[in-house]
Image: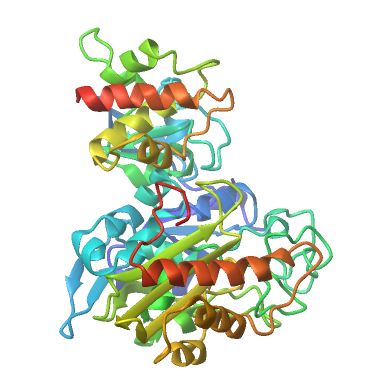
């Protein structure tokens, strides 16, 4: 690891001030991704600003019946929180599908949103990568791109966002609360992460000097008809090839509300309001789910090694929506896919 | 050219309660908890495997929770209680997990074992695993390249049933 200075922020305003003083400083909370990237020489911050002790660990109900989750709540504490287990089990399931028990104990909610792609070329400082070194090119385009994106790609980057938690947050319509030098703002989770276009070095819309303070869940939790299905190369502790977060509200067998988001296929969680609107009023059948999958995957593009992901995603979407319909969500421990 | 000495951070004094004993030391900011334990406190039971949070050999308990010490900065844990494999046995009696690993021959080379046992201690404290499938899932952050997994799961089941 390269040398760096260390500061402990006394409060959020202090963290914002320290970021403004030193633009190459970075915040650290759980550190599970940042320390790894620093050991790999991919991240070289001049200073780490420790925010891990700040009082952003509360989970509290909002006035409208939703939940506000402090940015420093550890992933494991969120997944096992009674209100998340009971009211937002899709989120609990997605979090438990990711990383390991140790990493979930360390990683914060805000840090999960900020984790960077696991593209092997992003990690390999001997190769060109527009995300790591803008303007150098994308090694994955003609390289080993089996894990890479099929949706929303650009000729500059085909990396994927690695988070499971964010996929469920996208489906649930979560909000991200941000504090910064010019005040506070709130953005939808689906607008927080970016597509790569010609600036793949920017993963999110977070501006310099800004700090995530909380995420907020709307009241609707889809606690009955939901499932998070993660398809990967081994049964646990691996990043998704394709993951699907599905949530339904049903009246009989008719869909009154649908949520559908994909992970492992794009630079951000992939969700389409049009597809969800098209599902509303339809019967919850494999045919209708297949049609929704085709719509959501419209424009999917294969690269040399990842063409299988398109059909895999289509089948995973139908399977996950059927699991949600039958209220038999995918277990993250018992791996058999129902 | 700037004077490089200006850029070298001061060592920072920290205090850790390691296996019940308060230890004070001065560290540079990039010292991981793993390196502090092994190189500064001579507690070499905790192992450095991948050093990237992928293998779990470095697992220790920080304030009772299992973490990867290789991805933890020592300076960020000032004041914390750390339990390593050296701190599990009490009064000359093996911890039930240590005894179970012996009973079930739950290791071959043994390199991953301190991390496996500390991780399993965290798992027991969490109380989330109820059967072998759940043990396997919640122990997936600890790799054993000898492939002693069936015996590791059996050992944890034994300790779980007796705790």
Would you identify the image quadrant in which residue A44 lies?
bottom right
State left or right for residue A304 relative to residue A146. Answer: right
Q: From where the camera sits, is residue B36 visible?
A: yes
- Across and down, in percent, residue A105 comes to 35, 48
Would you identify the image quadrant in which residue B36 lies?
top left
- Residues B4 and A25: in front is A25
Residue ID at (38%, 11%): B102
Q: Quadrant of the N terminus of chain A?
A: top right
Residue ID at (32%, 81%): A249
- Residues B45 and A305: in front is A305
**Looking at the image, is A232 positioned above or below residue B106?**
below
Residue ID at (19%, 59%): A82
- Across and down, in percent, residue A257 comes to 35, 86
Q: From where the camera sits, is residue A29 visible?
A: no
- Residues A270 and A46: in front is A270
- Across and down, in percent, residue A17 comes to 38, 73
- Across and down, in percent, residue A101 comes to 39, 45
Q: Looking at this rendering, what residue extends furthest in the top direction?
A: B92
How is the rendered protein coloured? Answer: rainbow
**Looking at the image, is A67 positioned above or below residue A97?**
below
**Looking at the image, is A117 positioned above or below residue A177?**
above
Number of numbered discs on residues: 0
Q: Quadrant of the C terminus of chain A?
A: bottom left
Q: Looking at this rendering, what residue extends furthest in the right direction?
A: A142
Would you identify the image quadrant in which residue A77 lies?
bottom left
Residue ID at (36%, 29%): B118
């Amino acid at each position: 690891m390269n040398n760096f200075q260390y500061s402990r922020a006394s409060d959020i305003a202090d963290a914002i001030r320290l970021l403004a003083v030193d633009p190459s400083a970075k915040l650290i909370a759980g550190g599970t991704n940042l320390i790894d990237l620093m050991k790999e020489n991919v991240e070289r911050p001049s200073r780490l600003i420790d925010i891990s002790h700040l009082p952003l660990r509360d989970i509290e109900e909002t006035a409208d019946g939703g939940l506000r989750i402090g940015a420093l709540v550890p992933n494991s504490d969120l997944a096992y929180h009674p209100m998340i287990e009971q009211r937002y089990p899709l989120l609990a399931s997605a979090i438990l599908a990711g990383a390991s028990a140790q990493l979930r104990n360390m990683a914060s909610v805000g840090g999960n949103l900020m984790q960077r792609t696991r593209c092997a070329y992003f990690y390999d400082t001997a190769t060109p990568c527009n995300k790591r070194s803008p303007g150098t090119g994308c090694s994955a385009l003609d390289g080993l791109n089996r894990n890479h994106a099929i949706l929303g790609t650009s000729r500059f980057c085909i990396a994927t966002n690695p988070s499971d938690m964010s996929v469920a947050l996208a489906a649930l319509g979560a909000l991200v609360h941000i504090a910064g030098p010019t005040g506070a703002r709130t953005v939808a989770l689906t607008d927080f992460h970016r597509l790569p276009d010609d600036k793949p070095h920017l993963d999110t819309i977070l501006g310099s000097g800004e700090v995530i303070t909380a995420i907020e869940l709307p009241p609707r939790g889809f606690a009955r008809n939901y499932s998070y299905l993660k398809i990967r190369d081994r049964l646990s502790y691996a990043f998704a090839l394709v993951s699907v977060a599905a949530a339904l509200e049903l009246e009989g067998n008719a869909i009154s509300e649908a949520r559908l988001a994909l992970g492992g296929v794009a630079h951000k969680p992939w969700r389409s309001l049009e597809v969800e609107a098209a599902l509303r009023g339809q019967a919850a059948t494999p045919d209708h789910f297949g049609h929704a999958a085709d719509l959501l995957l419209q424009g999917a593009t294969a690269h040399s090694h990842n063409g299988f992901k398109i059909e895999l995603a289509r089948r995973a979407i139908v399977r996950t929506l059927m699991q949600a319909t039958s209220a038999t969500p995918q277990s993250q421990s018992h791996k058999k896919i129902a | 050219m700037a004077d490089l000495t200006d850029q070298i951070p001061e060592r920072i004094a920290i205090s850790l309660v390691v296996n019940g004993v308060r230890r004070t030391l001065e560290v540079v900011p990039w010292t991981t908890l793993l390196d502090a334990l092994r190189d500064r406190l001579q507690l070499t039971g905790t192992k450095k495997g991948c050093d990237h949070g992928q293998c779990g050999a470095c697992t220790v308990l920080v304030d009772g929770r299992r973490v990867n010490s290789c991805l933890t900065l020592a300076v960020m844990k000032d004041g914390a209680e750390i339990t390593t494999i050296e701190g599990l046995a009490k009064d000359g009696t093996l911890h039930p997990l240590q005894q179970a690993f012996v009973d079930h021959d739950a290791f071959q080379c043994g390199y991953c074992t301190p991390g496996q046992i500390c991780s399993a201690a965290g798992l027991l404290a969490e109380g989330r695993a109820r059967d072998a499938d759940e043990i396997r899932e919640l122990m997936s952050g600890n790799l054993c390249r000898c492939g002693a997994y069936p015996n590791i799961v059996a050992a944890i089941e034994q300790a779980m049933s007796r705790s």
